[in-house]
Image (cartoon, rainbow, N blue to C red):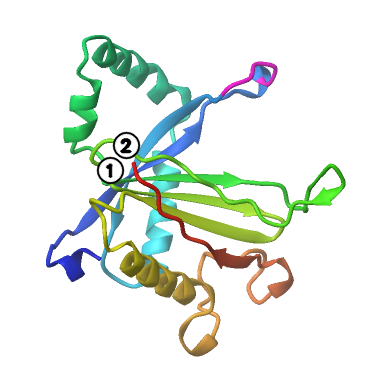
Amino acid sequence: MLRHRGETVDRFVVSVAVAVRRDDDAGHLGNQVGVMPVPVAVTGDPVQRLAAVARTTRARRPADPATSAALLGPVFRLLARVGAFRWFVDRQRQVTTMVTNLRGPDVRLSFLAAPIIDVLPVSPITGNVTVGFAVLSYAGTVVLTVVGDPLRCPDLPFLQARLQQELDLLTVGPAGKQPGSVVEAGRPGDRRQRPRLRQQFGQETA
């Protein structure tokens, strides 16, 4: 998309939400989330880039995921108290975009005896981050939602088309052949364990 705009970058820094709730804290309600910055290359073979992202994510995952929340929480509260939080998020240069990845139930759920067919994840964007991504696995499908500011990112349809092409390369490969990449679930060639992939896109004003 940036090349389409005439811009050039070598990598992005993605802010990935990580749960900080401990197993012994399940009795307390509410979100407990930290953040983990992950650098992502924007050029090269898609399968190799995906493998590199997986390695980087594993290496950067903190032993105590609550650390980032403990460090950033007081800073953000102080900025908000002095009225500088909006100024900060509108001018920050630490992250390019935000990603939320949730693993949902493996089986289809129901509500009042009605089956829940689809679940669409939606995550907010803020400040000068104009596009965000939310991923949710549910009952054998993976749903990817792109949320963007249509005023500052009017080329969302172009981003959708390019992202769809990348996902197709990772899941079915050129000419419909399996790429044999890390996105395959289960053993190589075991298609029974491989989840169906579905992409759905939405637009929302920040």
| Magenta-highlighted residues | 26-30
Eyeballing the image, is 29 above or below 159?
Answer: above
Residue 159 is inside the magenta segment: no
Indicate the amino acid at tag 2. Answer: Thr
Q: Residue at x 22, y 14 (%)?
A: 83
Q: How many marks?
A: 2
The numbered mark at residue 129 is 1
Secondary structure found at label 2 = loop
Please name the predominant secondary structure of the magenta segment in the image: loop
Task: Tell me residue 110's x, y (percent).
Answer: 81, 47
Asked if disc 1 and disc 2 are in contact, CB closer than 8 Å, the reply is yes
The numbered mark at residue 126 is 2
Indicate the amino acid at tag 1. Answer: Val
Please identify the quadrant where the N terminus is shown: bottom left
Eyeballing the image, is 27 above or below 18?
Answer: above
Please identify the quadrant where the C terminus is shown: top left
Pick whichever, 124 or 181, lies toward us: 124
